[in-house]
Image: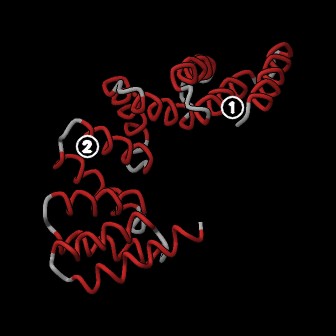
């Protein structure tokens, strides 16, 4: 977003704020805008203001937890995610974000368990599959990495992450023909995008 768009969005924000209607939505939308501009610390402030007005809003809670993860405030994010999961134990976004926290804290088994739980709720969840494929590759469980990557490719034939993990896993298994074929496809996709 360029500076002019930001100024317009800020001015719109301030004019709606003066009307005192739907302020929690205004705070939420402004926080989303700030996050999209990578102004996460400031976005956090507006998510909190939105929650003050509407404390149990799942979208705001989820976005704030994501912001806390980006800011490295994992304990704050965990508190929010625990609250979301107490209401909805199968909330996909909360489970994914919890798994990401465990990844960043190097608690690999807990992360895997959460990503696998996501797949019991949403069999084709790309985020869970990508994370499981990456973790399997890092563990040198190349057959598992290939399995998860193939599931990704079945859902999205042009998924660069899935193709990269698949290519790397074939390379580690010394199946250079497959690795080269996939690498060429990746290059073709990257050149067309």
Quarter of the figure with the C terminus = bottom right
The colouring scheme, among rainbow, by chain, secondary structure or one colour, is secondary structure
Please state which of residues 76 and 8 is positioned toward the viewer in this rendering.
Answer: 8
Between marks 1 and 2 in the image, the one whose residue lies nearer the viewer: 2
Q: Left of 133 or right of it: where is 35?
A: right
Q: Give percent across and percent down for residue 96.
A: 37, 48
State which quadrant residue 7 falls in. Answer: top right
Q: Quadrant of residue 12?
A: top right
Residue 54 point in image, percent of width and height: 61, 24
The numbered mark at residue 113 is none
Point out residue 88 in the picture as x, y percentages from the top left corner: 42, 44
Instruction: Say whether disc 1 or disc 2 marks the residue closer to the N-terminus.
Output: 1
| x and y, in percent, of residue 58 in the image | 53, 36
Residue topped by disc 2: 103
Question: Is 3 placed above or below 88 here?
Answer: above
Which of 176/43 is in front? 176
The front one of 141 and 2 is: 2
**Residue at 61% of width from left, 20% of height from top?**
46
Helix, strand, or loop for circle 2? helix
Which quarter of the figure is the N terminus placed in?
top right
The residue at 48%/77% (across/down) is: 157
Whether residue 8 sits left or right of residue 174 in the image: it is: right
Pointer 1: what residue?
A: 29
Q: Residues within 10 Å of mark 1 (few under 14, many from 20)?
A: some
Q: Is residue 3 above or below residue 122?
A: above
């Amino acid at each position: 977003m360029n500076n002019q768009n930001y100024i317009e969005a800020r001015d719109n924000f301030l004019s709606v704020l003066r009307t005192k209607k739907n302020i929690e939505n205004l705070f939420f939308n402004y926080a989303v805008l700030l996050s999209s501009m990578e102004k996460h610390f400031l976005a956090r402030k507006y998510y909190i203001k939105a929650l003050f007005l509407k404390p149990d809003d799942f979208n705001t809670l989820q976005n704030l937890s994501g912001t806390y993860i980006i800011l490295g405030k994992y304990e704050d994010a965990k508190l929010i995610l625990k609250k979301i999961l107490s209401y909805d134990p199968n909330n996909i976004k909360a489970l994914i974000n919890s798994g990401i926290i465990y990844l960043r804290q190097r608690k690999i088994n807990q992360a895997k368990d959460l990503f696998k739980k996501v797949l019991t709720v949403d069999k084709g969840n790309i985020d869970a599959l990508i994370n499981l494929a990456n973790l399997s590759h890092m563990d040198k469980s190349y057959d598992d990495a290939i399995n998860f990557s193939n599931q990704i490719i079945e859902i999205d034939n042009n998924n660069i992450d899935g193709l990269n993990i698949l290519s790397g896993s074939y390379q580690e298994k010394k199946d250079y023909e497959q690795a080269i074929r996939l690498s060429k496809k990746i290059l073709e996709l990257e050149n067309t995008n």
